[in-house]
Image: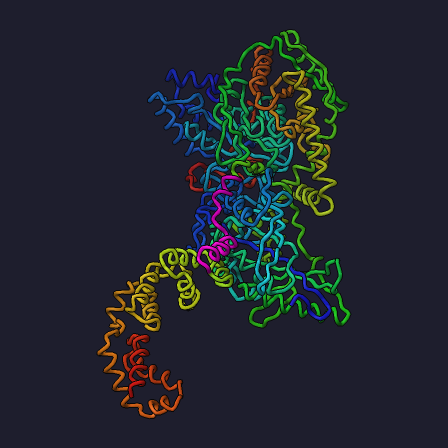
């Protein structure tokens, strides 16, 4: 959907990610999430009269690392600026941010959309401080009698990542966000949890006639709380703009908020009412000089990023591109896969389990792979049991679920639940004899050339053994018996 | 001589010799305050109980041999430096009842050596002004003539030291707010190099210009105060990582061979002849004592005032935006919504001059005007700084009048902001250049009003300034003269002392000090 009606869609994204530092950007207060309101505060982050900011060096390192992971140029000389506006959650009535000399600029990122690789430009990555949080007495600010302010979040370091208007569909926007999240996660600079607000996204979207070179008037979309919401909001907004244009109207440059429940975007304020932030250099901080040696040090610290991991999985483990990309797109999942795959003869089997049952169970529990009780060694052991014929592939599903739920070893689960495969010929023969006696019609069908009848009989044997009979053995004995009848 | 009239270094000798105690000095100072502050009105808040407690600590320190040169010496603080548990008002209605939960770095440093804090002194609201007439509460009087202003914005601190209501005091200087009142009150006042003294806890007016500095009765005491306050502070990112020297080493009565520049742009029309004469005489004195006097030119001086009145208000408009009524300080009543609350709070809480500067600064930073005003001003600031750099290629220091006039009458300029701004004409350039400058008394006018000479130096070369000022002091006798406040009314004398807004021992301190 790069086009809608006669128009091409143009999208650019602004992403804010909280950095994983222990303390805030300009004071020593903790950045812990979910504490009692106004317990992680001090005179500095409360903006009391007379206080001064002191820059957290780790935040600078993290921002530079994020920039490097996004293939940005790192500025030798950078500075902070004040962005002035009044709001109760902003104690100084200005946000310390970066205006014309951001830490990182001119980066790029590769994303895969519908099997095609697309390059998206990164305009800049800059460092700034979080605002506090207003808690309104009613659902909306206008309906509220009062609001309370929680300043725990005030001063937590953020990076703002601004993309070029390089995306041509809501799908691409979603793919960009997913890959960006993965890269930040890999780099270890942010925990990128949209539900905790540590990752937020605003989207700019405009339409232009096909073949046009100039951009159309854009609107800015806010208040999307998931990647899916970003995609949906963009889809809605593309449709809305197309309709306006088709009917000969003009797009108003404005900020629109996404109403998740109604699935529409609503105008918030027009450009003429927009704030004049009166940016100017922050006189309380000295400019940031990033030495080349620090950049090189941080570059060396960068972990292997998703694209190169994907390529390595194809090369080293012989995974198909689809599998390799899927697994590499989550660092915890990829770490899990790698640890297991290194200890297994059959990495593809590991990949299948990781992409299949494991991913399904993680989703159901809403956790990431690193939080799972089931560790890579569990999977390795279980695959060995399958190999040895101790359990069947079918039983393995049950074992896997049990290990996931309890964190017990595969062998113990098998023992406790009595899931050992029946590979004893005598026992299997006894069950087969009983099934054959109970199903004379199927035997007749088979003799009459209906090959399918044997599948039914195998199924009956497996059922009678509660799935524990060794399927290969069942097949072998059954065929022998049928041939002899 | 009475204890409250002595210099800090003289008091230290007596303390060290155990001839007197710090509690006695503090008692003497508070008796003096009782006697004259009803007239002078230097203080916003008095902290007698605390001062006495710290004086007792100081006496113990002398007993244990752990006393520093300023241990036990009564100190006054301009009321824009945060004091934990003690009201810090900036002489503004918007912070009338603000009690900080923390101490400014300079306060901590004095606390560590048991220097008793006498109280917090009056200023022009948020340090914006040159007379203390912009205080939201009352105007401080010049001890030499109580119909005249003490200068500003640190007028309360200057008057307190001049009227013997404190032995030493701190002020802050953004465009002359230490030097101009020092000159008007006949005391020594110094603005150190930007970055030498921590600004942590100094309520910001214009962050790139503000600097804390001392008011003292003589140059020796200036060196002693600098020894306490100068030096790196990790809480202030603009504080330089540089070890401060022992400033008393610069107290040398000798200027032989020093090259002293006299910038002709500082001797313009509009300077009162008496001021010009007094400064010229002092320059002659320096020449006689062996200094090489050179006339020089600093061509961008005439743009300093305009540059300052763009940069300082721009920074102030942002620094003062936090006073919105949400978290502390004054909040307007009966506002139906938050935007109205912001507007009413700020309209009612700030005085006229503060609002004027917020508006000027907001305008200068606005989209479409930024380049023409703020950015241009920053460029001119660089040119002014280059004037200084060039001057210091051939000179070790520069001298000029501190102010164009002797202290003016209360009310004389309060209706004319521009006339008031001109009072800082000679002091502003050093703030823009971030270089040190001091004012030392050099004469009394025929009417008996103090006249100060300004000495300006290279960044971090406070030593040369102290040396020149010390030499002037040792070879003149102005500093031995004191204002005559004998007939002054005491704090109970009624009239002016009943001004609203004066407080005693607020915050967690006890309320036992009654007027």
Relative to A275, is B200 on the left or the right? left
- In the rendered image of this protein, does residue B254 appear above or below residue B337? above
- State whether residue B98 appears in this view: no
Question: Which residue is outermost to the front?
Answer: A484
In x, y percent, where is residue A3?
Answer: 68, 67
Image colouring: rainbow
Span shown in magenta = A295-318
Question: Which of the pair A345/B327 is nearer the observer?
Answer: A345
Judge by depth and name the residue closer to the eye, A217 or A331.
A331
Q: Examine the rendered structure and indicate whether residue A264 appears above or below residue A189.
A: below
> Percent position (x, y) of residue A326?
49, 62
On the question of residue B406 being in view, the answer is: yes
Q: Nearer the viewer, residue B339 or A377?
A: A377
Q: Residue furthest left?
A: A426
Q: Is residue A314 magenta?
A: yes
Q: In screen coordinates, is A263 left or right of B48? A: right
Residue A212 rendering spot, x and y as whole percentages? 75, 61
Q: Main secondary structure of the magenta part?
A: helix
Position above or below: A36 against B67:
below
Q: How many tags in the picture?
A: 0
The location of residue A245, given as percent across then percent down, is 74, 68
Residue at (51, 20) in percent of width and height: B223
Q: Residue at x 42, y 24 (%)?
A: B71
| Residue B429 inside the magenta-drawn segment | no
For image coordinates 65% across by 49% down, the residue present is: A277
């Amino acid at each position: 959907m790069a086009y809608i009606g006669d128009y091409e869609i143009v999208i650019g994204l602004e992403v804010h990610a909280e950095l994983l530092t222990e303390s805030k950007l300009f004071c020593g207060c903790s950045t812990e999430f979910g504490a009692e309101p106004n317990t992680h505060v001090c005179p500095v982050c409360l903006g009391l009269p007379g206080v001064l900011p002191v820059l957290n060096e780790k935040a600078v390192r993290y921002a530079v690392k994020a920039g490097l992971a996004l293939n940005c140029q790192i500025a030798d000389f950078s500075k902070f600026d004040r962005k002035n506006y009044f709001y109760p959650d902003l104690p100084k009535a200005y946000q310390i941010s970066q205006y014309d000399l951001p830490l990182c600029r001119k980066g790029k990122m590769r994303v895969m959309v519908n099997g095609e690789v697309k390059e998206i430009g990164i305009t800049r990555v800059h460092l700034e401080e979080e605002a506090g949080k207003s808690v309104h007495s009613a659902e909306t600010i206008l309906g509220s009698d009062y609001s309370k302010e929680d300043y725990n979040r005030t001063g937590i370091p953020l990076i703002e990542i601004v993309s070029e208007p390089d995306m041509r569909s809501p799908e691409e926007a979603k793919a960009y966000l997913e890959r960006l999240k993965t890269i930040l996660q890999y780099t270890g600079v942010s925990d990128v949890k949209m539900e905790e607000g540590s990752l937020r996204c605003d989207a700019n979207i405009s339409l232009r006639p096909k073949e046009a070179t100039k951009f159309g008037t854009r609107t800015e979309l806010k208040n999307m709380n998931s990647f899916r919401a970003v995609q949906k909001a963009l889809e809605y907004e593309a449709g809305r703009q197309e309709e306006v244009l088709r009917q000969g109207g003009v797009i108003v440059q404005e900020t629109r908020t996404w109403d998740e429940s109604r699935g529409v975007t609503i105008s918030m304020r027009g450009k003429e009412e927009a704030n004049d932030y009166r940016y100017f250099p922050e006189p309380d901080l000295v400019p940031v000089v990033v030495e080349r040696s620090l950049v090189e040090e941080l570059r060396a610290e960068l972990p292997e990023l998703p694209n190169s991991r994907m390529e390595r999985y194809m090369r080293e483990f012989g995974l198909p591109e689809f599998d390799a990309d899927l697994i590499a797109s989550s660092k915890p999942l990829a770490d899990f896969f790698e640890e297991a795959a290194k200890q297994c003869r059959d990495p593809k089997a590991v990949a299948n389990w990781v992409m299949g049952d494991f991913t399904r169970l993680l989703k159901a529990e809403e956790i990431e792979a690193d939080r799972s009780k089931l560790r890579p060694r569990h999977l390795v052991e279980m695959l060995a049991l399958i190999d040895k014929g101790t359990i069947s592939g079918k039983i393995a599903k049950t074992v896997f679920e049990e290990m996931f739920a309890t964190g017990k070893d595969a062998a113990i689960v098998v023992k406790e639940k009595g899931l050992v495969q029946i590979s004893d010929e005598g026992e299997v023969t006894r069950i087969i004899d009983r099934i054959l006696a109970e199903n004379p019609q199927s035997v007749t069908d088979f003799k009459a050339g209906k090959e399918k009848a044997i599948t039914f009989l195998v199924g009956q044997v497996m059922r009678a053994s509660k799935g524990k009979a060794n399927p290969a053995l069942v097949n072998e004995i059954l065929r022998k018996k049928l041939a002899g009848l | 001589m009475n204890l409250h009239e002595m210099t800090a270094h003289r008091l230290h000798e007596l303390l060290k010799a155990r001839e007197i105690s710090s509690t006695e000095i503090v008692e003497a100072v508070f008796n003096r305050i009782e006697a004259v502050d009803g007239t002078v009105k230097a203080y916003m808040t008095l902290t007698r109980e605390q001062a006495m407690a710290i004086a007792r600590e100081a006496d113990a320190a002398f007993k244990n041999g752990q006393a520093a040169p300023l241990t036990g010496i009564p100190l006054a603080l301009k009321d824009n430096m945060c004091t934990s548990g003690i009201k810090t008002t900036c002489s503004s209605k918007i912070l009338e009842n603000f009690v900080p939960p923390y101490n400014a770095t300079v306060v901590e440093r004095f606390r560590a050596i048991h220097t008793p804090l006498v109280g917090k002194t009056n200023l022009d609201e948020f340090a914006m002004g040159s007379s203390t007439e912009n205080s939201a509460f009352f105007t401080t009087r010049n001890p030499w003539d109580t119909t005249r202003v003490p200068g500003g914005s640190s007028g309360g601190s200057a008057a307190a030291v001049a009227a013997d209501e404190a032995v030493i005091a701190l002020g802050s200087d953004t465009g002359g707010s230490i030097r101009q009142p020092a000159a008007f009150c006949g005391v020594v006042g110094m603005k150190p190099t930007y970055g030498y003294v921590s600004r942590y806890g100094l309520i910001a007016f214009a962050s790139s210009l503000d600097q804390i500095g001392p008011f003292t009765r003589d140059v020796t005491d200036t060196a002693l105060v600098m020894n306490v306050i100068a030096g790196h502070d990790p809480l202030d990112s603009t504080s330089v990582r540089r070890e401060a020297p022992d400033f008393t080493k610069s107290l040398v009565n000798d200027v032989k061979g020093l090259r002293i520049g006299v910038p002709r742009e500082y001797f313009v029309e509009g300077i009162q002849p008496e001021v010009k004469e007094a400064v010229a005489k002092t320059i002659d004195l320096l020449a006689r004592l062996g200094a090489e006097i050179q006339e020089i030119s600093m061509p961008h001086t005439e743009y300093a005032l305009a540059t300052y009145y763009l940069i300082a208000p721009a920074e102030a408009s942002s620094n003062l935006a936090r006073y919105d009524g949400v978290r502390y300080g004054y909040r307007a009543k009966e506002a139906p919504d938050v935007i109205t609350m912001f507007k009413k709070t700020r309209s009612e809480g700030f005085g006229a001059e503060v609002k004027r500067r917020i508006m000027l600064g907001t305008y200068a930073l606005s989209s479409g005007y930024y380049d023409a005003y703020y950015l241009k001003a920053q460029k001119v600031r660089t040119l002014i700084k280059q004037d200084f750099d060039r001057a210091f290629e051939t000179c070790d220091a520069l001298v000029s009048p501190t102010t164009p006039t002797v202290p003016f009458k209360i009310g004389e300029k309060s209706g004319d902001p521009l006339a008031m701004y001109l009072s800082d004409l000679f002091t502003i350039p050093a703030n823009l250049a971030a270089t040190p400058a001091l004012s030392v008394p050099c004469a009394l006018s025929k009417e008996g009003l103090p006249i100060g000479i300004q000495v300006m130096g290279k960044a971090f070369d406070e030593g040369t300034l102290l040396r020149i000022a010390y030499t002037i002091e040792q070879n003149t006798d102005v500093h031995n003269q004191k204002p005559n406040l004998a007939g002054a009314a005491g704090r109970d004398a009624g009239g002016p002392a009943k001004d609203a807004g004066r407080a005693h021992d607020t915050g967690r301190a006890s309320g036992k000090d009654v007027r």
